[in-house]
Image (cartoon, rainbow, N blue to C red):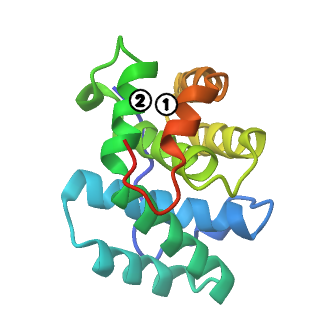
C-alpha cells in the first residue's frame, strides 16, 4: 500500500524545504492534481482552495495553474507514455501520487519543453521522496529516465499548436 501524507487545505506546504519558486508551484500543482484525480473534485475549486491556503507569490500561482491546466489537457498523451514506459504497471494500479508526478514531469520536459530534462526528473524524484512511498523515487526515475533516452517519443509529444499524440 502506498503512503500518501494527509494534507488539509490549511496545511502549509512551505514547511517542507523548497529550493525555488517552481518547486513550490510543483508541490501545489501535485496536491491539486492528486485531489482532482482521486476525488474528482472540480479543478478550479481545488486550485483556488490550495492557492488561498498557501498564499504563494503571483509567479508561483501562475506556474502552478499552468502545470495543472497543462497536465489535465494532455493527460491522455501522458498516460499513453506512462503505459509504454511502465508496461508492467497498469495505469490504474500506479499510485495516484506517482502517476501525477510522472504526468507533471512529462508535461514539463517533453510536451512543453520549458524545463531541462534533468531538472524535471530531479524535481519529480524529489516530489516522489516527499509524497510517495519508499519505491516511488526509483520508479519515477526509471520511467522518466527511459523516456528521456527516447528522442522519437519526445519529438512526437512536442508539437506546438498541434494535437499531441
Residue 15 appears anywhere in the view: no
The dot on residue 3 is none
The residue beneath circle 1 is: 133
70 to the left or right of 144:
left
* Vertical relation: 23 (above or below) 14: above
Residue 82's disc is 2
Q: Position of residue 18 (x, y in %)?
A: 75, 61
Q: Left or right: where does residue 161 sit relative to residue 122?
A: left
**Would residue 164 be visible to someone looking at this image?**
yes
Q: Identify the secondary structure beneath mark 1.
A: loop
Please identify, in this view, whether the residue under mark 2 or under mark 1 is nearer the observer: 2
Residue at 54% from the left image edge and 47% from the top image edge = 158
- Crowd band around label 2 with a 10 angstrom C-alpha radius: few (<14), some (14–19), many (20+): many
> Gap between marks 2 and 1, in whole Å?
18 Å
Q: Quadrant of the N terminus?
A: top left
Location of residue 1 with respect to 119 vertically, above or below: above
Amino acid at each position: 500500500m502506498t503512503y500518501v501524507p494527509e494534507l488539509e487545505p490549511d496545511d502549509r506546504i512551505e514547511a517542507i524545504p523548497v529550493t525555488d519558486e517552481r518547486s513550490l508551484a510543483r508541490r501545489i500543482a501535485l496536491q491539486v492534481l492528486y485531489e482532482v484525480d482521486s476525488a474528482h473534485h472540480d479543478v478550479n475549486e481545488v486550485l483556488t482552495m490550495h492557492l488561498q491556503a498557501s498564499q504563494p507569490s503571483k509567479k508561483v500561482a501562475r506556474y502552478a495553474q499552468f502545470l495543472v491546466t497543462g497536465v489535465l489537457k494532455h493527460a491522455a498523451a501522458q498516460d499513453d507514455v506512462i503505459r509504454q514506459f511502465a508496461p508492467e504497471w497498469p495505469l490504474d494500479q500506479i499510485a495516484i501520487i506517482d502517476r501525477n508526478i510522472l504526468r507533471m514531469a512529462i508535461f514539463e520536459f517533453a510536451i512543453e519543453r520549458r524545463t531541462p530534462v534533468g531538472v524535471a526528473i530531479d524535481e519529480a524524484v524529489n516530489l516522489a521522496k516527499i509524497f510517495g512511498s519508499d519505491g516511488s523515487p526509483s520508479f519515477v526515475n526509471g520511467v522518466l529516465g527511459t523516456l528521456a533516452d527516447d528522442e522519437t517519443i519526445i519529438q512526437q509529444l512536442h508539437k506546438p499548436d498541434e494535437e499531441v499524440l
